[in-house]
Amino acid sequence: MTVTSPPPTPRPPSRRRRLRRDALLLALMLPGVAYFLVFHYGALFGNVIAFQDFVPYLGVGDSDWVGFSNFAAMFGDPAFWNAVLNTVLIAALQLVFYFPVPLALALLLHSLTGKFLQKFVQSVVYLPHFISWVIVIALFQQILGGTGVLNGFLGDHGLHTVDIIGNPTLYKPLVVAQVIWKESGFGTIIFLAALSQVDVQQYEAAALDGAGYGRRLWHVTLPAIRPVIVLLLILRLGEFLSIGFEQFFLQRDAVGPEAGEVIDTFVYYAGFANGNWGLAAAAGLFKGVVGLGLIYTANRIAHRLGEQGVYAR
């Protein structure tokens, strides 16, 4: 009786051979790596001016070090805390009212059976993402402004007119509504990708057991995409204080700084408008540290709840 030996296990290619094999992919990756090195990691060194009386023509090397004086001035400035309060309120409103909208829209698109209708609706809801904030705010101004279409209609019918754009009380709901209109469609991309990975056999098995759409949604769809929902929620919390600049800078003067100032516009006016670069850098560093703390805390909570979070333990 002849005993055949198993075939030898092929040796893994050497590091040099792997580099030669993946040279094209590595070359394609270089622009992305360079972008992060220059504009993200390299820019971190600029935070040192938060501890300096920074003078641009002297540079970082010759400007005087002032320790935590900029942070003391920042924490003692009522305008800074007003900007923090406005930022937190708008971010909380976005978290409650904006974050669920892309998920609901993705579930709606996923339930459409007609491919043509699905692609048409996707194209329509994606479109606002590619419109600049200048155009978006101009559209809202033309519709809801003091001389806009809405007030024109109300005035023609003898009704009381209202300036929604310039009303400080309505400013926060207005900016959240603008974000929902502009970004909800584009935010569905990740949810749709997650929904496409749900095993169709689970839907078929649930349907054979008599589960309707609601029960399939609750017991099959949502548990399948729960890791993605948790991941996006954690990332959202990490950017809790980074609600944007252009949208608020363009509308700040219409409602005044008391209602329209956020941390990013505070940084702009402190640095570029008033020349207090150290104070502006301190405010930016404060925002980054708070974001890091939020994302770390949310990730720990996700781990305790049995989710993977941003990274595995």
Image (cartoon, rainbow, N blue to C red):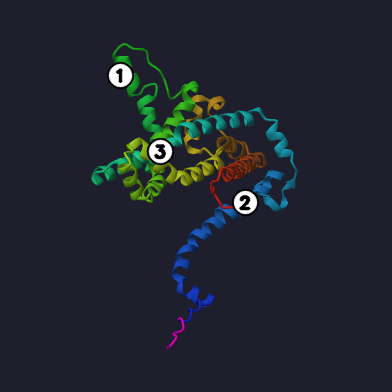
In the image, residue 252 above or below residue 209: above
Viewer-nearest residue: 224 or 274: 224
| Coordinates of residue 5 in the picture (x, y in percent) | 46, 84
The amino acid beneath tag 3 is Trp
Which numbered tag is attached to residue 4? none
Which residue shows up at 53% across the image and 34% down it? 91
| Coordinates of residue 114 in the picture (x, y in percent) | 24, 44
Please name which of the two marks, 1 or 3, marks the residue nearer to the observer: 3
Viewer-nearest residue: 54 or 296: 296
Pointer 2 or 3: first along the chain: 2
Q: CA distance from mark 2 to mark 1?
A: 51 Å
The residue that label 1 is drawn on is 153
Report the residue that reaches farthest toward the top.
158
Which residue shows up at 54% across the image and 29% down it? 89
Mark 2 residue element: helix
Q: What is the quadrant of residue 285 in the picture?
A: top right
Pointer 2 or 1: first along the chain: 2
Q: CA distance from mark 2 to mark 3?
A: 43 Å
- Left or right: residue 75 compared with residue 134: right
The residue that label 3 is drawn on is 218
Mark 1 residue element: helix
Quarter of the N terminus within the rendering: bottom left
The residue that label 2 is drawn on is 44
Which residue shows up at 54% across the image and 75% down it? 15
The amino acid beneath tag 1 is Phe
Q: CA distance from mark 1 to mark 3?
A: 44 Å
